[in-house]
Image: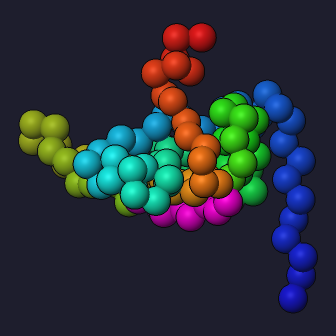
Amino acid sequence: MTAPRASRMSKEQLMSVLVAPHVTEKTSLAMQNHNQYTFRVRRDASKADIRRAVELMFEVKVVGVQVVNEPGKARRFGRVLGRTQDWKKAYVSLESGQTIDYEARAKT
């Protein structure tokens, strides 16, 4: 078995890994009950990249990262059939006692 590859992304590249927070009813419950936050991330991002990006941007300690590849949906644009883009979602678990405040980060 080979060792996992080390992420060699610079700080500037890590800043582009997280696309947006993904807030739904399900993710709000995960935040309250399990201290788990959800983000839309770049499709080429690895778990290590996501961990480093969250720790860099929010100055918190990440315990674990789970990643889900979400397939795009079929859509109609008038008579033309189309498809939305595939995207990747990351569930990030933080150490107990640590939180991320999205609103405070958006104002700075």
Q: Residue furthest front?
A: 97
Is 96 rendered above or below residue 22? below
The answer to which quarter of the image holds residue 105 is top right
Question: Could one spot residue 83 in this view of the protein?
Answer: no
**x, y percentage for residue 44?**
65, 52
Quarter of the rendering occupied by the C terminus: top right
Q: Residue 75, percent across and down?
A: 20, 48
Residue at 87% over, 65% down: 5
Residue 61 in view in this figure? yes
Left/right placement of residue 42 relative to residue 48 reads left
Q: Is residue 65 left or right of residue 107?
A: right
Residue in the picture at 60% in, 47% down: 97
Q: Is residue 77 magenta?
A: no
Main SS of the magenta segment?
A: strand
Q: Which residues are magenta?
A: 63-70
> Could you tell me which quadrant the N terminus lies in?
bottom right
Q: Residue furthest bottom?
A: 1
Q: Can you give x and y, in whole percent of width and height, for residue 94 in the image? A: 61, 52
